[in-house]
Image: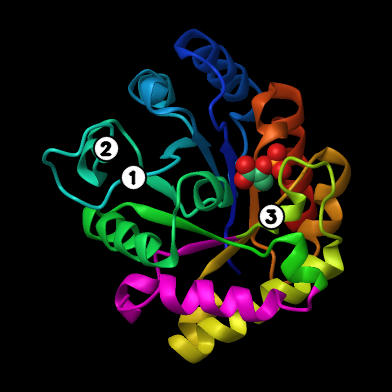
């Protein structure tokens, strides 16, 4: 059985003191959760302070992006080893907002993925179709292209550390989530692709999160699906009550 992983993507919200307040609230609510990997992904400036508060807790730290070079004259960028130094164990790569607003491509995703794996952290690789692509029946083709190009050259040995997040772009921040059936269809397809790229065993071990307007009201049905192994949560992760509720419901469903 794959261990659930639920990550909060705080996007460009919360300064340092607000990040610490949210982190402390979540620690209080979630201290007894044992069977779920809980990950918080604050803005870069909050990473080191949040990391300190998370010491010896059951909550782990992740970053929202990374640059693939180790160091150098790359103004504004941050390397995998710097994120690790700040306490990160996970890094989100290829979020649709980065693809949409910051020219992220499958090729840059691939370079970032290699840098994160080399650093020893675990990458959360985001894939997903736009509404136009879904309406044109292109969803599976898009997912296939994003995965094949994004995972190019990633060894079977490293693949075990991958986490894939299926995030239909039309469901992110819109309040419109994919139905559990729509999500499961794509998750099962992603697993079948991973089987082709790697092996059945490796594909069975890779965790696939769903992301897109996840909230306490829809998490139960999503977590009941066999190929959904957790969630990447945006808006609802910015609040102690809603994020804790999502995690507690998931624990109950998958116990
Ligand atoms: C996200 O940021 O990855 C996300 C899924 O956002 P939201 O939950 O707000 O749709």
For the residues bearing labels 1 and 2, Cβ distance under 8 angstroms:
yes
Disc 1, SS: loop
> What residue did someone put label 1 on?
66
Residue nearest the observer in this picture, 104 or 148: 104
For the residues bearing labels 3 and 1, Cβ distance under 8 angstroms:
no
Q: Residues within 10 Å of mark 3 (few under 14, many from 20)?
A: many
> What residue did someone put label 3 on?
169
Colour setting:
rainbow
Disc 2, SS: loop
Disc 3, SS: helix
Visible in this render: residue 246?
yes
Give the residue displayed 54% in from the left and 21% down from the top: 23
Q: Residue furthest left?
A: 72
Give the residue displayed 80% in from the left and 40% down from the top: 215
Q: Estimate the spatial distance between the alpha carbons at disc 1 and disc 2, rounded to whole Å.
A: 6 Å
Q: Estimate the spatial distance between the alpha carbons at disc 3 and disc 1, rounded to whole Å.
A: 21 Å
Read off the magenta span.
136-165
Give the residue displayed 60% in from the left and 74% down from the top: 143
Q: Estimate the spatial distance between the alpha carbons at disc 3 and disc 2, rounded to whole Å.
A: 25 Å
Identify the mark nearer the N-term, 1 or 2.
1
Could you tell whether 153 is left or right of 221 in the image? Answer: left
Percent across and percent down for residue 1 are: 61, 69
């Amino acid at each position: 059985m794959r261990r659930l992983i639920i990550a909060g993507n705080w996007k460009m919200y919360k300064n340092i003191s607000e990040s610490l307040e949210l982190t402390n609230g979540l620690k209080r609510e979630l201290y007894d959760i044992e069977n779920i990997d809980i990950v918080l992904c604050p803005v870069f400036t909050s990473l080191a302070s949040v990391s300190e508060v998370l010491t010896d807790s059951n909550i782990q730290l992740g970053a929202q992006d990374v640059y693939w070079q180790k160091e150098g004259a790359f103004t504004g960028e941050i390397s995998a080893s710097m994120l690790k130094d700040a306490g990160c164990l996970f890094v989100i790569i290829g979020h649709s907002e980065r693809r949409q607003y910051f020219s992220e491509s499958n090729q840059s995703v691939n370079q970032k993925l290699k840098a994160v794996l080399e650093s020893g952290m675990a990458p959360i690789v985001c894939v997903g179709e736009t509404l136009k692509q879904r309406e044109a029946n292109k969803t599976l083709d898009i997912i296939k292209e994003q995965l094949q190009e994004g995972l190019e050259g990633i060894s079977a040995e490293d693949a075990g550390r991958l986490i894939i997040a299926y995030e239909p772009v039309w469901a992110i921040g819109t309040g419109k989530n994919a139905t559990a059936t729509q999500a499961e269809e794509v998750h099962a397809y992603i697993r079948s692709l991973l089987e082709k790229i790697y092996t059945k065993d490796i594909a069975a071990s890779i965790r696939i999160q769903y992301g897109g307007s996840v909230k306490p009201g829809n998490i139960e049905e999503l977590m009941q699906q066999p190929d959904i192994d957790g969630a990447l949560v945006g808006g609802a992760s910015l609040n102690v009550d809603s994020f804790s509720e999502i995690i507690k419901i998931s624990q109950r469903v998958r116990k």
